[in-house]
Image: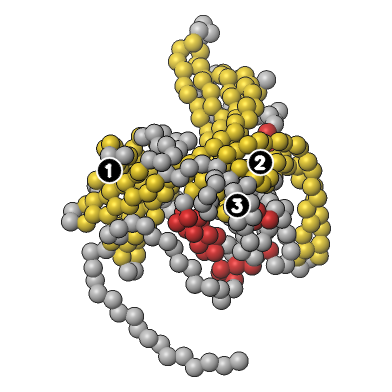
Amino acid sequence: MASCENTIRYEYDSNDGQITMLSQMYTSDTEHTVYLSMSYPDRVDSLPGATVVCWVNGEKYVAEEQPVPMEEYYNPGPYLETRTDAVVLRRRHQLFNEYVFSATLRPGDEVRVEASKGSQKVWAQVTVPQPAELVQVDTQRVVRSLSYVDIDGSDSYDEAFMEMAVKIRDVPGDDSYFMLAGDYLMEGEFQRHDESGAVDSTAHYRQWNREIDYQTFHDAILEDGYSAGGVNSLLEDILVTNQMHCFSDKEFRDGEAVVRPFFDADYFIWRDYGYQWICPGTDEGDLHASFNLHLRTISRDFYNYLRALNNLQTYGYDVIPIIEPTILPNNVTGGYGLVSVGADRTVTFDLGTRHIVHDASEGIYYGY
């Protein structure tokens, strides 16, 4: 195979850039984040110092710019053998800035987000959709054998999952679009004791693992026309999978359906091992764990946006780029981006509380 190629130099005029605005809000949250960047033909920069306002049914909420997080940076100095002040703090390099506002969002609300800096202003307006019903969730712990094939041959291994049978009732009368997501929360109050054993101070600990991945094992609705992934074969790295876990109601429009996600079983049990870095400087506390399953009814624009991300972020796009062009939906007037609000229905699994004690000799917290 041969080809003739002519190199064409792409020229563009220098410009002041355009604002890109992204925000994915949910009715289950009371704090919402708007991400702003400045997009140029050849780069993307952060956008500090902007003004961001959200209107909910005409009521105004002003977003506050969040400080850029600090990070450790290794700087050995003029000589490699110099180790004084080798690790320094600096602001993390980001291509965006975060703006946060607090508001309660409900189905049917009209939400308008505006962002401006200097002479530039962008805005997007959306209506919060009516939620589908999360009718019932049944669970069972299962062990599945997973197999894979690679250049060294084939093998298999067993893995424990929490299988969920999630019964959904569709929103009648409309095409509907969904995300199914899980998150895991550990939270507690910890105390520091003085020499007499009395409580000297307290500290709050919170660890939130959001958007936990799960397996679908050929569930037709959850795969939404994509491959299941997890097939673990020579083709695994070139399959486009539903990494964003979005799907439509085309298989059960105006009716009900049962979908079956498989989450890692470790999220549903307490492990008898040491917990490092839970709440440094404290001696003991009570740690509570919970798992939340969210059914989110989303807009068609957001669904198409997630489908586009599936194509862009799956390995196959890099390995076999001869696929249909990927277009990112845009609902931001005056700039780029996508603003959406999802209507959330949630089931919470209370995993209980453990008393955690710090072992000073080992520097580890143990649960009892």
Amino acid at the residue labelled 3: Arg
Please state which of residues 162 and 305 is positioned toward the viewer in this rendering: 305
Residue 53's tag is 1
Q: Position of residue 55 (x, y in %)?
A: 29, 41
Above or below residue 203? Residue 259 is: below
Residue 271 vs residue 258, the one in the foreground: 258
Give the mark toward the camera: 3 or 1.
Answer: 3
Q: Amino acid at mark 1?
A: Val
The outermost residue toward the top is 196
**Circle 1 crowding by C-alpha within 10 Å: few under 14, some 14–19, many from 20:** some
Chain-order first, disc 3 or disc 1: 1
Q: Is residue 89 visible?
A: no
Residue 344 pos. (x, y %): 51, 39
The residue beneath circle 3 is 253
Which of the pair 17/367 is nearer the observer?
17
**Mark 1: secondary structure:** strand
What is the CA distance from the residue labelled 2 to the residue labelled 3?
14 Å
Residue at the image position 79 percent from the left and 43 percent from the top: 143
Residue designated by label 2: 167
